[in-house]
Image (cartoon, helix red, strand yellow):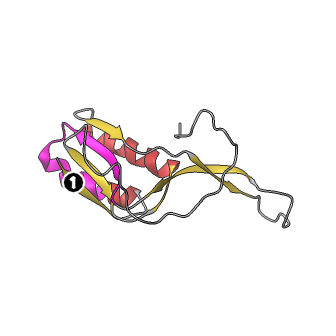
Amino acid sequence: MLLQPKKTKYRKSFKGKISGYERKVINIKLGKFGIKAMKSARISAQQLEALRKSLNKLLKNRGKIWLKIFPNIPATSKPIEVRMGKGKGQIDHWFARINAGRILFELQGLPFSLNKQVLKLSKDKLSIPVKMIYN
């Protein structure tokens, strides 16, 4: 099941611009390792779920994973070959706005030998450059 909010105040919203640096979630609080975004972008719920599942498979329940972002913004799209006008399209997928410098995941109980594998997996699954940081 993909991540999406149970209830929102408004069904559809503007996508908005993403720029600047993160000011709040920049330090590791729960785990020992973190995956940090190096560029501002939108990350879809499908990308987050794929990374979470593959990290769980790699760690084999040896460690703990905290997801520090949530896709709470809907993206709409109109069906193919529909004429212009007639309002905004239906909700297609959910995404999260990510500023540069934000912690995406926190990990604990990770053997030090798996760090390169976790970083490579994160780079493959996400559409933005990331780096591993330590507490």
In percent of width and height, residue 115 lies at 19, 51
Q: Which amino acid does label 1 sit on?
A: Ile
Residue sitting at x 59%, y 60%: 16
In percent of width and height, residue 34 lies at 26, 48
Residue sitting at x 20%, y 56%: 116
Q: Observer-nearest residue: 71 or 13?
A: 13
Residue sitting at x 82%, y 57%: 87
Is-magenta flag for residue 110? yes
Residue sitting at x 39%, y 48%: 51
Total tally of numbered discs in the picture: 1
* Range covered by the magenta-colored residues: 101-121
In percent of width and height, residue 96 lies at 50, 51
In percent of width and height, residue 110 lies at 19, 41
Reading the image, the residue beneath label 1 is 133
Q: Is residue 128 left or right of residue 26?
A: right
How dense is the environment of label 1, judged by Cα within 10 Å: few (below 14), some, or many (20 and up)?
A: some
Q: Considering only vertical position in the picture, is 61 above or below 17?
A: above
